Image (tube, coloured by chain):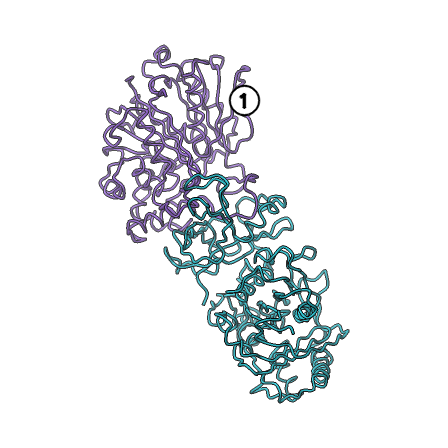
Amino acid sequence: MAGIKSYGTYVPLYRLSRAEIARAWGVAEMPGERAVANYDEDSLTMAVAAARDCLKGIDTESIEGLYFASTTSPYKEKQSAATIATVLGLPREAVTMDFSGSLRCGTNAIRAAIDAVNSGSAKSVLVCASDVRLGYPAGGDELAFGDGAAALLIGDTEIIVEVEGSYTLHDEIQDVWRSDRDLFVRSGEDRFIREKGYNRVVLEAVSAALREFKLSQKDFSKVAFYSPDSRQLSMVVRKLGFDSKTQVNDTLHSTVGNTGAAMTLMCLVAVMEEAQGGDRILLTSYGNGCDVFSLKVTDEIEKVGDRRGIKGHLASKRMLSSYNKYLRWRELIDVQPPQRPPIELRQPSPSAQWRETQKELRLCGTRCKKCGTPQYPPQRVCMTCRAKDEFEYYSFADKAAKVFSFSHDYVMATVDPPVTVTVVDFEGGGRIMCDMTDRDPEETKVDMPVEMTFRRLYYVGGIYNYWWKCRPIRC
Amino acid sequence: MESIKDKVAIVGMGCVKFGENWDKSLDDMIIDAAYEAYEDAGIGPDDIQAAWFGTVWAGETAQIMAAPLKLPYIPVTRVENACATGSEALRAACYAVAAGVCDVALALGAEKLKDTGFSGLPQTRPIATWSYRLTTQTPPAVFAMMATGYFAKYGLSYKEGKKLLAQIAVKNHHNGTLNPRAHFQREVTIEQVVNAPMIAYPLGLYDCCGVSDGAAAAIVTRADMAKSFRADPIYIKSLQICQGPREGFMNPNFDFAHVEETCRGGAAAYAEAGIRNPREEISTAEVHDCFTITELTIMEDLQFSPRGRVKDDIEAGTFNLDGKLPVNTDGGLKSFGHPIGASGLRMMYEVYKQLQGKAGPRQIKNPRLGLTHNQGGEPGAATVSVVIVGNDLG
């Protein structure tokens, strides 16, 4: 029987207080804060980060599928799952799929992964859900939304959470949507979508699911429900007869925001972090229907290794200094162009990118088989002993590292000046020059420990150019 | 292996005023530099038997130079070797003369940087490495990492390091005030330099050279023919280029506090010229002060100061105009800016004038040997030229 083997999440370092957004627009203050993806992050890079959290200590060669769920995939045509699988170093024959279309796509992917494992077509499938959704400036969605990602490894051995039962229904309604011409999420009149959308459908689905599972409210230790906001969550759980004090874990709305396709999975991880063997969890998504799952926690949950999860990521944050910065990072305003060479000169070459894909997306250098020197980028002639074509590929992505030298570049055109450039030395050998992200220039020091993180360098000519940066160790 | 020493002489040089030459085209600067050199050598354009044109950004082939100068269907070649481009053009011309395949050759470097519409250096698409592996730093940032590296290695605080670097800027700007060809001819103070806006931490505005237009030219001939052109030719003692395998970007052993290519290129040049004690024997040096930190490390890499001890010499004024070993007497890149292809020959123009005793208010006493040094690329992956010349044979 399929179940969850491991979990991971990602919450960007930066948070914007809702009071700051309210101040910018001169509207009434709202409590809490929301997570904001850095300018070099998108749903794909955040999915990679959540997946790396989930796969700590797990052999990526053993994973036979990767499903990516998002309503904000960087490309409309080009599969993100294939990119993520490559970055993570999954086997060539791993099944990759992108799920999209509604906020329910995260649990659509889980359902498909469970089916794949139960049917025997894959032994384990990694599901990543991630979203960076845009609400209209000065609107309620902008306040309520947040950016984040979660990853669950589905398989049938060493299960930490069993899937006892599942139920689904679809529902046609124009309540929350974004057309192929829209940048911002649209929604219908708030009273209509609340009553006839989320409320009606979740009540119907969960009631039917409980009947089908032959379980009642008191059989569950916790519910993990998608919800647009805290108010609607507490209304729905109350109507369904759950105790909102003991059975609901509502940490995300006030700290991260509504993370779209990732929300249901992130809620589940928040619950799993607190769970013990024997606990039962009711998982429910929403988005043109509902997917409902009854989950049973096993004793194996104690064995899950060190995961940053929700708790770790919430403990590590930096407040965004202003709402302007949010507008700039999401490129929602035009600013005066820099007097620097045009970005078009840095148009990546698809053929060069293709040739380098395995090496560069995985941050693979080489290690000399003769003298053992790790080096990046891959070298056919060893820089130390000059042996030719005597090398093996060697990934630096997960190696411990520290800053050897750095500068803050105030001249380079960037969304978020200055560009912090670094020389990074790795434990075990090897040196890379790369940018540092998620940093405070004041705190950047020689010898500071850093870790590698997969980021978007820039976008030009329709191509998102991804590579790696270093960052101060999170958590 | 033979040495180039005393086989070739420079008998004429030209150099335009460097700066934001809005009213001059690349053609204008090429013509002005070449004709000053012709006049200085006492020759005409038809006396040139071969020519080398150094430019990084002006375009492909040397037609860019051959057309405005109306060169008469002779061998003309464009060379490029980053910031060492101008010196590379001189090296090619000298080698041709030394080989005996021509007797009079022209080396000219020129760059027009101020028509790009933006500040900083132009950018082209480097096809050879164009995949994902793109860091986004500018040249100031890479050199700034050498300042960070040097400060860390020798335990200098930010304040101490900034003040040390500032003294280099102050010196070179002072020298520039004595030079009508310099882009910047204004004194700066330590306080101004230290408090200037940050360009790439820890380098501020005055730690960085400007972006300028410029051109410079040299006429070279066989050493045994030199005196038929002029009474005071300047003889080539060594011509070295050194390029490393970009190791500093990959090898944790590289300390970002020196440039290996300058150490090795300098040592090769001293060997070729028969110099045993550079600090004592070199009379003056024009070195690649694209950033103040670059001049600082060059002083150690060229063995002018002991390793890690350049501070003592900077503070003692060793490299000032009236010091023991004046460096960048014309104001350096700090005062001239850096039109890439022209800089090597602009440096040689100053050394040539100094060795002839014609450097006016900047003239140093009794110079015998002068050195020019260019450093292209970046710390860790540099292309270095070192040229040594003297006013006597032997």
Measuring from the top left, give residue B358's x and y in whole percent: 31, 23
Task: Please say whether residue B126 is visible from this viewpoint.
Answer: yes
* SS category of the residue bearing label 1: helix
Residue A252, quarter of the rendered image: bottom right
Name above or below for residue B64 compared with residue A307.
Answer: above
Residue A283, quarter of the rendered image: bottom right
The chain displayed purple equals B
Farthest right residue? A172
Decide: few, some or many residues near mark 1? Use Cα within 10 Å; few <14, some 14-19, many ≥20: some
Count how many numbered circles sit on residues in the image. 1
Please identify the quadrant where the N terminus of chain B is shown: top left
Measuring from the top left, give residue B236's x and y in whole percent: 35, 21
Name above or below for residue B257 compared with residue A181.
Answer: above
Task: Please say whether residue A133 is visible from this viewpoint.
Answer: no
Tag 1: residue type? Pro
Measuring from the top left, give residue A61's x and y in whole percent: 57, 59
Name above or below for residue A472 compared with residue A382.
Answer: below
Q: Toward the viewer: A422 or B53?
A: A422
Identify the residue at image location x=49%, y=51%.
A394
Q: Chain of mark 1?
A: B
Q: Toward the viewer: B386 or B355?
A: B386
Q: Toward the viewer: B196 or A299?
A: A299
Instruction: Please tell me the colour of chain A.
Output: cyan
Q: Mark 1 — residue?
A: B68
Residue B85, quarter of the rendered image: top left
